[in-house]
Amino acid sequence: MTYGDIDERMLRRIIGALGVALPVVLMVWGLFLSGWPPQDSLSSYYSLRTRDAFVGILFVIGWFLFAYKGNEKMDNIAGYLACVFALCVALFPNSGNHWERIVHFSSATCLFLVLSFFSLFLFTKTKESPKGFKHTVSTFSFRAALSGSSMTREKKKRNKVYIICGLVILACIILVGLYNFFLQNTAISDIKPVFCLEWLMIWAFGFAWFIKGETFLKDK
Protein backbone atom coordinates (compact mmCIF):
# COMPACT_ATOMS: atom_id res chain seq x y z
CA MET A 1 0.00 0.00 0.00
CA THR A 2 1.24 3.49 -0.79
CA TYR A 3 0.16 7.03 0.10
CA GLY A 4 0.97 9.19 -2.88
CA ASP A 5 4.64 8.49 -3.47
CA ILE A 6 5.31 7.23 0.07
CA ASP A 7 5.34 3.51 0.77
CA GLU A 8 3.32 2.37 3.79
CA ARG A 9 6.35 0.97 5.60
CA MET A 10 8.41 4.04 4.78
CA LEU A 11 5.68 6.27 6.25
CA ARG A 12 5.79 4.32 9.50
CA ARG A 13 9.57 4.55 9.59
CA ILE A 14 9.47 8.30 9.04
CA ILE A 15 6.99 8.71 11.90
CA GLY A 16 9.24 6.61 14.14
CA ALA A 17 12.38 8.50 13.11
CA LEU A 18 10.78 11.87 13.81
CA GLY A 19 9.69 10.69 17.25
CA VAL A 20 13.18 9.44 18.11
CA ALA A 21 14.80 12.61 16.73
CA LEU A 22 12.59 15.18 18.50
CA PRO A 23 14.03 15.06 22.06
CA VAL A 24 17.60 14.70 20.76
CA VAL A 25 17.31 17.75 18.51
CA LEU A 26 15.71 19.82 21.26
CA MET A 27 18.29 18.93 23.89
CA VAL A 28 21.36 19.36 21.67
CA TRP A 29 20.15 22.66 20.22
CA GLY A 30 19.08 23.79 23.68
CA LEU A 31 22.54 23.07 25.09
CA PHE A 32 24.06 25.45 22.55
CA LEU A 33 21.54 28.14 23.46
CA SER A 34 21.23 27.89 27.24
CA GLY A 35 23.82 25.36 28.38
CA TRP A 36 23.35 22.68 31.02
CA PRO A 37 21.04 21.57 32.63
CA PRO A 38 18.31 20.82 30.08
CA GLN A 39 14.86 22.35 30.32
CA ASP A 40 12.25 21.02 32.74
CA SER A 41 10.29 19.35 29.93
CA LEU A 42 10.29 18.98 26.17
CA SER A 43 7.51 21.56 26.01
CA SER A 44 9.71 24.08 27.84
CA TYR A 45 11.95 24.28 24.77
CA TYR A 46 9.17 26.34 23.22
CA SER A 47 10.56 29.34 25.12
CA LEU A 48 13.87 29.08 23.22
CA ARG A 49 14.67 29.27 19.52
CA THR A 50 14.26 25.51 19.65
CA ARG A 51 10.53 26.21 19.28
CA ASP A 52 11.18 26.03 15.51
CA ALA A 53 12.18 22.38 15.79
CA PHE A 54 9.52 21.61 18.43
CA VAL A 55 6.65 23.02 16.38
CA GLY A 56 8.02 21.88 13.02
CA ILE A 57 8.59 18.25 13.97
CA LEU A 58 5.23 18.01 15.75
CA PHE A 59 3.49 19.41 12.66
CA VAL A 60 5.21 16.87 10.42
CA ILE A 61 4.42 14.00 12.81
CA GLY A 62 0.82 15.21 13.00
CA TRP A 63 0.31 15.35 9.26
CA PHE A 64 1.99 11.99 8.70
CA LEU A 65 -0.36 10.49 11.30
CA PHE A 66 -3.26 12.14 9.47
CA ALA A 67 -2.09 10.49 6.24
CA TYR A 68 -1.63 7.11 7.92
CA LYS A 69 -4.11 4.46 6.79
CA GLY A 70 -4.37 1.25 8.75
CA ASN A 71 -6.30 -1.95 8.16
CA GLU A 72 -9.64 -0.57 9.33
CA LYS A 73 -11.52 2.61 10.09
CA MET A 74 -10.42 2.62 13.73
CA ASP A 75 -6.77 2.99 12.68
CA ASN A 76 -7.67 6.03 10.60
CA ILE A 77 -9.66 7.65 13.42
CA ALA A 78 -6.76 7.11 15.83
CA GLY A 79 -4.44 8.76 13.31
CA TYR A 80 -6.77 11.74 12.90
CA LEU A 81 -7.04 12.19 16.68
CA ALA A 82 -3.27 11.94 17.12
CA CYS A 83 -2.83 14.57 14.40
CA VAL A 84 -5.23 16.99 16.12
CA PHE A 85 -3.59 16.51 19.52
CA ALA A 86 -0.08 16.90 18.08
CA LEU A 87 -1.06 20.17 16.38
CA CYS A 88 -2.66 21.47 19.57
CA VAL A 89 0.54 20.69 21.53
CA ALA A 90 2.50 22.64 18.93
CA LEU A 91 0.13 25.61 18.65
CA PHE A 92 -0.68 26.15 22.33
CA PRO A 93 2.53 26.63 24.36
CA ASN A 94 2.88 25.55 27.97
CA SER A 95 4.09 29.10 28.73
CA GLY A 96 0.94 30.77 27.38
CA ASN A 97 -2.11 31.99 29.24
CA HIS A 98 -4.27 29.80 31.46
CA TRP A 99 -6.39 28.34 28.66
CA GLU A 100 -3.41 27.76 26.40
CA ARG A 101 -1.71 25.75 29.14
CA ILE A 102 -4.86 23.70 29.70
CA VAL A 103 -5.11 22.90 25.97
CA HIS A 104 -1.39 22.12 25.78
CA PHE A 105 -1.22 19.69 28.71
CA SER A 106 -4.55 17.99 28.01
CA SER A 107 -3.62 17.57 24.33
CA ALA A 108 -0.19 16.17 25.25
CA THR A 109 -1.81 13.63 27.59
CA CYS A 110 -4.38 12.62 24.98
CA LEU A 111 -1.69 12.36 22.30
CA PHE A 112 0.36 9.91 24.34
CA LEU A 113 -2.78 7.93 25.24
CA VAL A 114 -3.61 7.55 21.54
CA LEU A 115 -0.02 6.54 20.78
CA SER A 116 -0.21 3.94 23.54
CA PHE A 117 -3.50 2.71 22.04
CA PHE A 118 -1.75 2.27 18.71
CA SER A 119 0.93 0.11 20.30
CA LEU A 120 -1.27 -1.98 22.59
CA PHE A 121 -4.43 -2.50 20.57
CA LEU A 122 -3.79 -1.77 16.89
CA PHE A 123 -0.24 -2.88 16.15
CA THR A 124 -0.75 -6.20 17.97
CA LYS A 125 -3.70 -7.21 15.78
CA THR A 126 -3.60 -9.74 12.96
CA LYS A 127 -5.77 -10.12 9.88
CA GLU A 128 -7.92 -12.58 11.85
CA SER A 129 -8.48 -10.21 14.78
CA PRO A 130 -12.01 -8.83 15.28
CA LYS A 131 -12.57 -5.37 13.87
CA GLY A 132 -14.15 -2.38 15.57
CA PHE A 133 -13.29 -0.52 18.76
CA LYS A 134 -15.58 -2.53 21.04
CA HIS A 135 -14.31 -5.92 19.87
CA THR A 136 -10.68 -4.80 19.82
CA VAL A 137 -10.74 -3.57 23.41
CA SER A 138 -12.95 -6.31 24.84
CA THR A 139 -11.01 -9.20 23.29
CA PHE A 140 -7.51 -7.90 23.97
CA SER A 141 -5.35 -9.75 26.43
CA PHE A 142 -1.60 -10.11 26.75
CA ARG A 143 -1.87 -13.86 26.16
CA ALA A 144 -3.99 -13.41 23.04
CA ALA A 145 -1.62 -10.78 21.73
CA LEU A 146 1.44 -12.98 22.20
CA SER A 147 0.16 -16.31 20.99
CA GLY A 148 -1.77 -17.77 18.12
CA SER A 149 -1.02 -20.33 15.44
CA SER A 150 -1.54 -17.79 12.67
CA MET A 151 1.31 -15.60 13.90
CA THR A 152 4.87 -15.93 12.73
CA ARG A 153 7.67 -16.02 15.25
CA GLU A 154 8.68 -12.50 14.22
CA LYS A 155 5.10 -11.23 14.69
CA LYS A 156 5.06 -12.58 18.23
CA LYS A 157 8.32 -10.79 18.94
CA ARG A 158 6.97 -7.57 17.43
CA ASN A 159 3.88 -7.83 19.61
CA LYS A 160 6.05 -8.08 22.70
CA VAL A 161 7.79 -4.88 21.68
CA TYR A 162 4.47 -3.13 20.98
CA ILE A 163 3.09 -4.10 24.38
CA ILE A 164 6.24 -2.99 26.19
CA CYS A 165 6.21 0.35 24.37
CA GLY A 166 2.51 0.91 25.09
CA LEU A 167 2.91 0.08 28.77
CA VAL A 168 5.98 2.32 29.06
CA ILE A 169 3.95 5.24 27.70
CA LEU A 170 1.10 4.60 30.15
CA ALA A 171 3.49 4.22 33.09
CA CYS A 172 5.26 7.46 32.22
CA ILE A 173 1.96 9.36 31.97
CA ILE A 174 1.08 8.19 35.49
CA LEU A 175 4.53 9.10 36.82
CA VAL A 176 4.38 12.58 35.28
CA GLY A 177 1.00 13.11 36.92
CA LEU A 178 2.27 11.95 40.31
CA TYR A 179 5.27 14.24 40.05
CA ASN A 180 3.20 17.27 39.05
CA PHE A 181 0.75 16.76 41.89
CA PHE A 182 3.01 15.69 44.74
CA LEU A 183 6.73 16.09 44.04
CA GLN A 184 7.29 19.44 42.35
CA ASN A 185 9.92 21.68 43.96
CA THR A 186 11.46 18.76 45.81
CA ALA A 187 14.94 17.25 45.59
CA ILE A 188 13.79 15.02 42.73
CA SER A 189 13.22 18.12 40.60
CA ASP A 190 16.97 18.42 40.05
CA ILE A 191 17.02 15.39 37.76
CA LYS A 192 14.33 16.89 35.47
CA PRO A 193 11.91 13.95 35.82
CA VAL A 194 9.29 15.30 33.40
CA PHE A 195 11.93 15.83 30.73
CA CYS A 196 13.25 12.29 31.22
CA LEU A 197 9.80 10.70 31.23
CA GLU A 198 8.64 12.61 28.15
CA TRP A 199 11.83 11.56 26.37
CA LEU A 200 11.16 7.93 27.31
CA MET A 201 7.54 8.16 26.13
CA ILE A 202 8.35 9.62 22.75
CA TRP A 203 11.16 7.11 22.21
CA ALA A 204 8.77 4.27 23.06
CA PHE A 205 6.36 5.71 20.49
CA GLY A 206 9.11 6.09 17.89
CA PHE A 207 10.53 2.61 18.43
CA ALA A 208 7.08 1.02 18.12
CA TRP A 209 6.59 2.71 14.76
CA PHE A 210 10.06 1.62 13.66
CA ILE A 211 9.06 -1.98 14.38
CA LYS A 212 5.70 -1.50 12.63
CA GLY A 213 7.59 -0.24 9.60
CA GLU A 214 9.48 -3.57 9.60
CA THR A 215 12.81 -1.85 10.20
CA PHE A 216 13.53 -4.65 12.66
CA LEU A 217 12.00 -8.11 13.26
CA LYS A 218 10.72 -8.31 9.70
CA ASP A 219 8.93 -11.49 8.67
CA LYS A 220 11.20 -13.81 6.74
Image (spheres, rainbow, N blue to C red):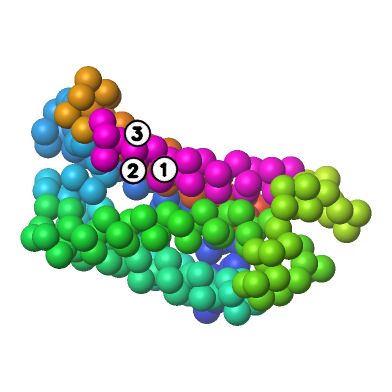
Q: Looking at the image, how many numbered discs can be counted on the residues?
A: 3
- Label 1: few (<14), some (14–19) or many (≥20) C-alpha neighbours in 10 Å: few
Q: Name the residue nearer the viewer: 125 or 143.
A: 143
Left/right placement of residue 198 relative to residue 125 reads left
Please tell me whether mark 3 sits on a helix, a strand or a loop.
Answer: helix
Q: Name the residue nearer the viewer: 181 or 124.
A: 181
Residue shown at the point (26%, 40%) measured from the top left: 180
Q: Which residue is mark 3?
A: 196
Q: Are marks 1 and 3 in contact (CB under 8 Å)?
A: no
Which stretch did the figure color magenta? 157-183
| First along the sequence among labels 3 and 2 | 2
Q: Which residue is mark 2?
A: 177
Question: Considering only vertical position in the picture, is 182 above or below 115?
Answer: above
Kind of residue sitting beneath label 2: Gly
Can you tell which mark lies on residue 174? 1
Residue shown at the point (11%, 60%) measured from the top left: 98
Question: Considering only vertical position in the picture, is 48 above or below 34?
Answer: below
Kind of residue sitting beneath label 1: Ile
Mark in the foreground, 3 or 2: 2
Please tell me whether mark 1 sits on a helix, a strand or a loop.
Answer: helix
Separation (CA) of disc 2 from disc 1: 5 Å
Query: Percent position (x, y) of residue 111?
Result: 40, 59
| In magenta segment, residue 174 | yes
Left/right placement of residue 214 relative to residue 129 reads left
Dominant SS of magenta comes to helix
Q: Name the residue nearer the viewer: 10 or 141.
A: 141
